[in-house]
Amino acid sequence: MPRTKEHSSVHLRGKFIAIVAAGGVFGALARYGLGLVIPAPGAWPLPTLLINLSGALALGALLEGLSRRGPDVGNRQVLRLALGTGFLGAYTTYSTLALDAVHLFTAGAATAAAGYLAASLLGGAAATTAGIWVGAWHHRRGTGPRS
């Protein structure tokens, strides 16, 4: 039986591809803009670290908040694709994280590179966990008993 448009995978549907692409444009612009204004002390990649940590926090909060509001359909699906996959996918930049680490290693700054990788990876996991906590807290606050 052939697949109908209603049953095709989300990643194959033009409407959803456009939603992700639009979110990605704004995420990449936000990353670029912040990269220009956040200083990089001593060529240490602070802008990339802060962008990735804030993106991990936001993604944790977004996905937890959406998942607590119901199934991934309709407006929740559009928000997940636009903000999570599109905006935050383009906003965070793990390829630049890897390139920054290589630059630090090749410049002879192995300790700084290891610290940067640890801060990025462990900090990203902590930021995501914090974002999940924020999303859960926000949901509880919004659905708790009213006075």
Image (tube, rainbow, N blue to C red):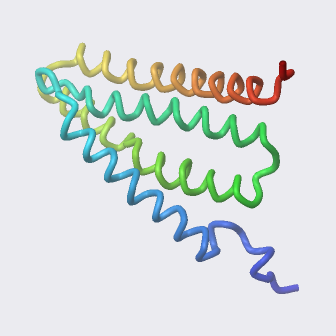
Residue under the image location 19 percent in, 40 percent down: 36
Residue under the image location 41 percent in, 42 percent down: 92
Residue 127 relative to residue 114: left or right? right
Query: Which of these two is toward me, 90 or 112?
Result: 90
Query: Which of these two is toward me, 25 or 122?
Result: 25
Residue closest to the far front: 147
Residue closest to the far bottom: 2
Residue 119 relative to residue 87: left or right? left
The x, y position of residue 69, in whole percent, is 78, 42
Looking at the rendered image, the quarter that the C terminus falls into is top right
Looking at the rendered image, the quarter that the N terminus falls into is bottom right
Residue under the image location 19 percent in, 27 percent down: 104
Q: In this view, does 20 lie above or below 111?
A: below
The x, y position of residue 142, in whole percent, is 75, 29
The x, y position of residue 94, in whole percent, is 39, 40
The x, y position of residue 15, in whole percent, is 60, 74
How many discs appear?
A: 0
Q: Is residue 26 above or below residue 120?
A: below
Q: Where, by quadrant of the figure, is residue 70 drawn?
A: top right
Residue 1 relative to residue 142: left or right? right
Q: Where, by quadrant of the figure, is residue 120 drawn?
A: top left
Residue under the image location 62 percent in, 24 percent down: 134
Q: In this view, does 90 lie above or below 37?
A: below
